[in-house]
Image: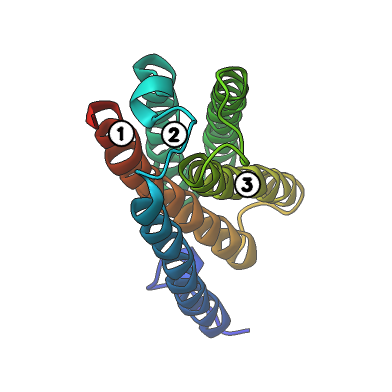
Amino acid sequence: MKVDHSQPLEYSTEQNRLNILGFWVFLGAEIMLFGTLFTSYFTLVDRTGDGPTGAEIFEIFPVLMETFLLLTSSFVIGLGIHAMRLGKKKAMLTFFVITLLLGLGFLGFEIDEFMVYYHEGATLQTSAFTSMLFTTLGTHGAHVTLGFFWGLFIIIQVAKRGITPATANKSFIFSLYWHFLDVVWIFIFTFIYLEGMTRV
């Protein structure tokens, strides 16, 4: 395996570069998935039937906390990748652990939020609006859950094997995934929550 020392470690082999390119293609498919969910949501947002509207169930505090936790995690994982490039294994692992803990905090708030919606009469079966709301938020939450376990496996690999071209490549690809989830959340925060809170 030929290593190009002029490149960052995650790009230092031909296989690594192909892996990253392939993951960008995968993210393109993910964009299509969430694009379809957003389109469906916007089409059905006013079809509330006898159920509650977004303005009636959305609360600003949990949404702001979720946003703070997820965006902070994106910043922290950036620090983790920077530490990785400097060869600082302990700092990298620390930042990755903090990232996953912030992700867990986000999931905790989201689960609590779903329970509140349920008690207020908003379920998958209540209306077209609530069905697409839960589907969109749930799909994103499932991606965060997958990301948590993925990140955990990467932490274990780096702890055992150290920072190598292979583990650096996996870690960098994971960071791209995590940043993507944060970008999706910005759209959710803006166009589902904020817009929903002001919708009459």
Tell me which residue sits at (43%, 38%) in the image.
Answer: 48
> To which quarter of the image does residue 111 belong?
top right
Tell me which residue sits at (40%, 51%) in the image.
Answer: 44
Under tag 1, what secondary structure?
helix
The alpha-carbon separation of the residues under discs 2 and 3 comes to 14 Å
The alpha-carbon separation of the residues under discs 1 and 2 comes to 20 Å
- Which residue was labeled with disc 2? 70
Image quarter hosting the N terminus: bottom right
Query: Earlier along the polypeptide chain: callout 1 or callout 3?
Result: 3
> To which quarter of the image does residue 121 belong?
top right
In the rendered image, the vertical position of residue 176 relative to residue 196, given as above or below: below
User: Is residue 86 shown to the viewer in this render?
Assistant: no
With 94 as the anchor, is 157 left or right in this view? right
With 159 as the anchor, is 193 left or right in this view? left
Q: Residues within 10 Å of mark 1 (few under 14, many from 20)?
A: some
Query: Which amino acid is tagged 3?
Result: Ala
For this orientation, the residue located farthest to the front is: 50
- Residue placed most toward the observer, 63 or 157: 63
Label 1 or label 3, whichever lies nearer to me, is 1
- Residue placed most toward the observer, 99 or 124: 124
Tell me which residue sits at (56%, 59%) in the image.
Answer: 168
- Which residue was labeled with disc 1? 196
Residue 103 image offset from top left, x and y in percent: 55, 33
